[in-house]
Amino acid sequence: MADQTTIVSCTCGVRYERREVALPIKDVGCFDCDECGTRLEIWSGRKVPAFKRLPSEEREAKRA
């Protein structure tokens, strides 16, 4: 089964790459936006999400 990644956007505009990872034991947790603190996901199980913040489009436009 291939890794499936999706893009998750917070209401404040920050975007995250989300993928699922399998753990050897059950995990319970949550993920909050780094910028505004909005709760984006809650989980309980062996398959848990992993989030990676993506560069903002504004920041990328300033580099170009």
Image (spheres, helix red, strand yellow):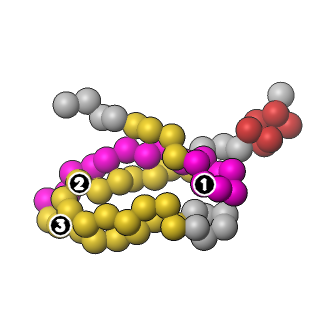
In front: label 3 or label 1: 1
Residue under the point 66% across and 43% down: 55
Residue under the point 49% across and 61% down: 40
- The x and y percentages for residue 33 are 57, 63
- The quadrant the C terminus occupies is top right
Mark 2 or mark 1: name the one nearer the start of the chain: 1
| Residue marked by disc 1 | 10
| Residue marked by disc 3 | 26
Outermost residue, front direction?
Answer: 11
Q: Residues within 10 Å of mark 3 (few under 14, many from 20)?
A: few
In whole angstroms, how far apart are the C-alphas of marks 2 and 1? 22 Å
- The amino acid marked with disc number 2 is Lys
Q: Which mark is residue 18?
A: none
- The x and y percentages for residue 38 are 58, 67
Q: Is residue 63 left or right of residue 56?
A: right
* SS state under label 1: loop
Q: Is residue 61 left or right of residue 24?
A: right
Of residues 44 and 19, the one nearer the viewer is: 44
Image: magenta residue range? 9-24
In front: label 2 or label 1: 1
* SS state under label 3: strand
In reply to whether residue 61 is colored magenta, the answer given is no
- The amino acid marked with disc number 1 is Cys
Q: Which mark is residue 47?
A: 2
Residue under the point 35% across and 54% down: 49
- The amino acid marked with disc number 3 is Lys
Quadrant hosting residue 23: bottom left
In whole angstroms, how far apart are the C-alphas of marks 3 and 1? 26 Å
In whole angstroms, how far apart are the C-alphas of marks 2 and 3? 8 Å
- The x and y percentages for residue 63 are 82, 34
